[in-house]
Structure formats: C-alpha cells, structure tokens
Image (spheres, rainbow, N blue to C red):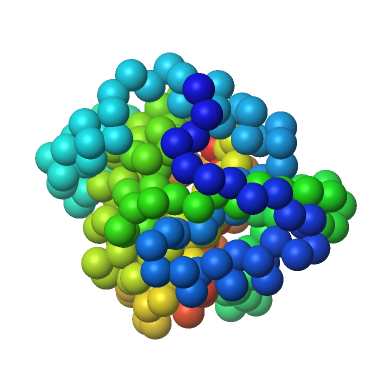
Amino acid sequence: MDFQCDTLKVSGKDALATYQSLKATADIIPVILGDDDDLASMVEAADYITESFSQLLQQAENIDAADWFDKRQAQDAEYYDLTTGEWQDDLSSADNLSVHLDILTGEPKPEVNIALVPVPKSWMIPAFLKIGGWNECPTAAEHAAIFKYWDERYGITVAGITADVIELEVQRPPTTREQALQLAEQQFIYCPDIVYQGTQTIAALASTLLNGRVWFFWWD
C-alpha cells in the first residue's frame, strides 16, 4: 500500500522552509517523513495494521492517556524506573527539528518526503499514517491518544516522522522544573530509549524539556 495522501519530494536543505510554508495551508497538515528508505519502511510497517483510520481513531478515543502511563509503568516498574536523578543546568532545551538531517553527519539529507495529511487535528496523524506497534513503540491508536493528551496541555504538532523517529513542535512547553519533570516521566514511559540511550536520567531529559520547542522520540 501507499499512504493515502499526497507527498512532496524536496531537498533536505529546503525541507524546513517548505514545511513552514505548507503549514499555512488550511486543509492539510504537512509532516516531514524522512528519505525514501524511511518512507519505504513506514509503508511496509503500515501494511501490518489492518484497522482503518476511523477504527484507530475510535480506539484512541477510548484510551485514557494518563491511565495508560500509569498502567505501562506498573507492568514493569523495574524497567520503567522513575528515579529522577540530578537536574542538569548545563543542558539546553531543544528548539530545532532534525528529522531532515543525516543522523551521522548532521547535514541535510539529499532528499526528503513531506506528507500532506488531510486531517483536522495533528494528533490524528499517527492513526492516519498507521505508525507504530513494533517493539516498544506504542501502537498508532496509543500515539494518537497520547498526542491528543499532550496537545491539550502543551499545544503539540506532529512535525516529523521517519521509520523510527517522531518529532513534535510545542507551542506551550513546560516552564517550571516541576512541570518538566512530570512531563519527562511521561515521555520516558512512552519512549524509554530517549533516556536509556540518550539523556541517561529523567531529570536530564526534563532539563531539555524546560521551555523546549521540539520533542524528539526514537525507538530502537
């Protein structure tokens, strides 16, 4: 199958400018999808999801995100260890998208794809594109439910998706340490790799979320 929406192919160096320009279009939501290899992997993974977009949305509506965090943590409290660690004042908040960049060189990829997703709310995008449901990556319905929950609190936009990465833009990021730590616990439960293979502690993650305008998630 192919994603049931139009896509544009642009150079990596033009991806952010094109994405920002497309955001002004009222009837679609643009999402940077990475390069052709990423797109092929995403389409292949989506083939295994048999539910329709409307069915996935209904599933998402039936998920209480706050309860989902609690239940997932309780299922393996040792793995989802909420020991906070020490706050890191020397870590800066994330403010720039990276989905269009080569992970090894940091340079723009030669080409990336941008999907034009015909949904009214950005949190619906994982259900439309049928993203997730492998290894520790939440299902498409779980992504949608969690993004709706975060959107109501922080004003999030799904900006980038590759085969194993999701990036969100954030309008109202946490402004206090308490808020950032609470959010960091949720993000750790949602995506443990950003701590275990990234910041190492929940407090370090929280320090990057404080006033941060971009959230990065990666599943191994």
Does residue 34 lie above or below 55 as drawn?
below
Q: Residue at x 60, y 65 (%)?
A: 19
As drawn, is 67 to the left or to the right of 79?
left
Q: Quadrant of residue 170?
A: bottom left
Q: Residue furthest left?
A: 62
Instruction: Name the residue nearer the viewer: 61 or 113.
Output: 113
Q: Residue 205's spot in the image, x, y percent?
A: 51, 61
Does residue 2 lie above or below 80 as drawn?
above
Does residue 8 lie above or below 184 as drawn?
above
Q: Residue 79's spot in the image, x, y percent?
A: 41, 34
Q: Quadrant of residue 98?
A: bottom right
Q: Residue at x 66, y 35 (%)?
A: 38
As drawn, is 43 to the left or to the right of 76?
right
Query: Split into 4 quadrants, where in the image is the C terminus?
Result: top right
Q: Residue at x 47, y 42 (%)?
A: 5
Count of labels in the image:
0
Q: Residue at x 46, y 19 (%)?
A: 47
From where the camera sits, is residue 106 visible? no
From where the camera sits, is residue 65 visible? yes
Q: Residue 207's spot in the image, x, y percent?
A: 52, 71
Q: Residue furthest bottom?
A: 175
Q: Residue 202's spot in the image, x, y percent?
A: 47, 57
Instruction: Name the residue nearer the viewer: 162 or 54.
Output: 54
As drawn, is 11 to the left or to the right of 158?
right
Does residue 168 lie above or below 166 as drawn?
below
As drawn, is 148 to the left or to the right of 30?
left
Instruction: Name the residue nearer the viewer: 190 or 153.
Output: 153
